[in-house]
Image: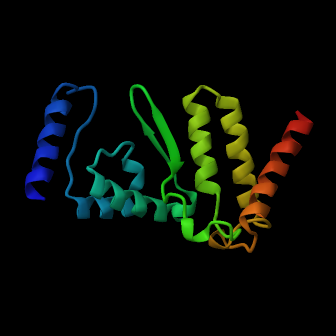
Amino acid sequence: MKFSDGLFLESCRTIAAQYEGRIAFEDRIVDNMCMQLVQKPELYDVLVLPNLYGDIVSDLCAGLVGGLGVAPGANIGPEAAVFEAVHGSAPKYAGQNKANPTALMLSGVLLLRHIGQQAAAQRVEDAIRAVIADGRSTTYDLGGSAGTREFADAIVARLDSVAATA
């Protein structure tokens, strides 16, 4: 790993030099980065990491905001973008009405923002936030006892009520 990590760091330094004075660049050892994210997450806007460290750090950050069930994901390139829950599809819970769909829904919010649908993205995000804050229709990992369908239905109902009053 010393060779591959070293190559990654060297590449980052080379690219960062092209943006000197416009984009701040600092390197960190992964264990120190994790500690800093737990203690002072507000200091960081963007992290660039190789795959293994990215997976570890994204799971740590998900834990800081409520768990993998609420962590959306986006992989955006110059010609394509993919939006998905950070934790993946949770196949062991398929068809059991147990999975928290928040991460997938928030990934949809990221998609809407990416394609310029800001108002729609905000409506969905606000509905998700309101249902979680209300606490009556949340999944077990959010402190409730609702299933996937009940949680999703509550969000749809919130969207419908906002649309009816608009």
Count of numbered circles on the image: 0
Q: Is residue 17 above or below residue 149?
A: above
Q: Is residue 100 above or below residue 130?
A: below
Q: Is residue 134 above or below residue 143?
A: above
Residue drawn at 60 percent across, 51 percent down: 104
Q: Is residue 82 above or below residue 30?
A: above
Q: Which is more toward the observer, 42 or 90?
A: 90
Q: Is residue 50 left or right of residue 133?
A: left
Image quadrant in which you'd find residue 97: bottom right
Residue drawn at 33 percent across, 46 percent down: 47
Residue drawn at 52 percent across, 60 percent down: 65
Q: Position of residue 40 (x, y in %)?
A: 38, 57
Q: Position of residue 33 (x, y in %)?
A: 28, 58
Q: Residue furthest left?
A: 3
Tell me which colouring the rendered structure shows: rainbow
Q: Position of residue 67 (x, y in %)?
A: 52, 65
Q: Is residue 12 left or right of residue 39?
A: left
Q: Residue furthest right?
A: 164
Image quadrant in which you'd find residue 91: bottom right
The quadrant of the picture occupied by the N terminus is bottom left
The quadrant of the picture occupied by the C terminus is top right
Q: Position of residue 109 (x, y in %)?
A: 62, 41
Q: Is residue 103 left or right of residue 74?
A: right
Q: Is residue 5 left or right of residue 35?
A: left
Q: Which is more toward the observer, 91 or 67?
A: 91
Residue drawn at 74 percent across, 68 percent down: 147
Q: Which is more toward the observer, 134 or 56?
A: 56
